[in-house]
């Protein structure tokens, strides 16, 4: 559905995007995960024809973006990071205005608006001025505006920034509904939990470069991050340590009275606790180090996502 090959973009002396390549399949929710300033918005702006790349190629549904911008524009909807609504218009009038720009016939447009207001849960507020809406409600109207022409692809640039938990969850539900309708979604965020919930595949982007991409399990393999059980004992003698090594066949890293055991924690925890007891070790603290995107990102980039 989308093919990006060796694309770069600079602004004077700053190279915002550096030789990135990725592909997105039809019906996929593809996440661009990275900190602020990583190049996510620049990438979205190039894909949505707002910016022109310096080099490389972008193909959308078989069309070369550099040669077929109009064809590509009909295929895509864009939910920008900034709210693109008129405060003095009602929600309904905003959608009428944006729909008219897509030249959707008025009868059909009104039907689509009714459907989309129901989808985003704002039917009862359709006649209220946008200036009376919360940030989360405005973002939901923003999503509806991007869907009026029934695009095959939806670009969403940080769509939950500054929204309340209720609106954030509603946005997640909207995305999941759209995905079931086979709409391809490109989703940028710096919130790992959003990518973990929503995205089929993920590209980790940092300082304008794609560090790694794939499913979460594929990223785990690339990063070599292992699930582990971390245990701190009251004390640990050499005989106790040797007994624990004898009872457990896992890779273990010891540091004073602490041990980190690489294993499937949910499956092996009872066996590990039993071995500790058999070795005469008293557990003071136990922590499960689960493999998540935060651990993977840290391993691949050497820094926390929000640094």
Image (cartoon, grey):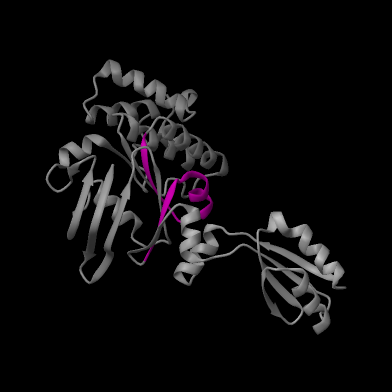
- Of 261 and 124, nearer the camera is 261
Whether residue 201 is in magenta: the answer is yes
Whether residue 249 is in magenta: the answer is no
Q: Position of residue 24 (x, y in %)?
A: 33, 46
- Of 47 and 97, nearer the camera is 47
Tell me what residue is drawn at x 80 percent, y 74 percent.
233
Q: Is residue 131 above or below residue 211?
A: above
- Of 289 and 91, nearer the camera is 289
> Which quarter of the image is occupied by the N terminus?
top left
Q: Is residue 212 above or below residue 31?
A: below
Q: Position of residue 185 (x, y in %)?
A: 37, 41
Q: Position of residue 284 (x, y in %)?
A: 82, 70
Q: Quadrant of residue 8?
A: bottom left
Q: Position of residue 279 (x, y in %)?
A: 85, 72
Q: Is residue 49 visible?
A: no
Q: Is residue 224 visible?
A: yes
Which residues are the magenta region? 183-206
Using residue 136 as the reference point, say whether residue 213 is left or right of it: left
Q: Quadrant of residue 182?
A: top left
């Amino acid at each position: 559905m989308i093919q990006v090959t060796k694309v770069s973009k600079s602004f004077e002396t700053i190279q915002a995007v550096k030789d990135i390549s990725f592909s997105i399949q039809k019906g996929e929710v593809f996440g661009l995960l990275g900190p602020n300033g990583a190049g996510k918005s620049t990438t979205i702006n190039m894909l949505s024809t707002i910016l022109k790349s310096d080099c490389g190629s972008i193909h959308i549904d078989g069309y070369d973006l550099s040669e077929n911008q109009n064809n590509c524009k009909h295929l895509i909807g864009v939910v920008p990071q900034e709210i693109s609504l008129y405060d003095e218009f009602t929600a309904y009038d905003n959608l009428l205005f944006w729909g008219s720009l897509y030249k959707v016939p008025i009868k059909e447009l009104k039907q689509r608006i009714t459907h989309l207001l129901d989808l985003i849960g704002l039917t009862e507020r359709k006649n209220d001025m946008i200036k009376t809406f919360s940030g989360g409600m405005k973002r939901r109207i923003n999503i509806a505006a991007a869907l009026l022409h029934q695009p095959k692809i939806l670009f969403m640039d940080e769509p939950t920034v500054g929204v309340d938990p209720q609106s954030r969850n509603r946005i997640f539900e909207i995305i999941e509904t759209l995905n079931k309708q086979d709409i391809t979604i490109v989703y940028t965020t710096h919130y790992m939990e959003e990518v973990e919930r929503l995205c089929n595949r993920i590209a980790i982007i940092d300082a304008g470069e794609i560090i790694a991409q794939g499913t979460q399990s594929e990223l785990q393999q690339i990063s070599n991050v292992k699930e582990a059980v971390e245990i701190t004992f009251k004390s640990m003698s050499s005989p106790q340590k040797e007994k624990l090594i004898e009872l457990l066949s896992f890779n273990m890293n010891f540091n004073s009275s602490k041990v980190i055991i690489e294993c499937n924690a949910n499956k092996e925890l009872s066996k590990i606790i039993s071995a500790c007891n058999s070795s005469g070790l008293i557990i003071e603290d136990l922590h499960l180090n689960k493999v998540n995107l935060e651990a993977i990102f840290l391993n691949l980039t050497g820094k926390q996502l929000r640094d």
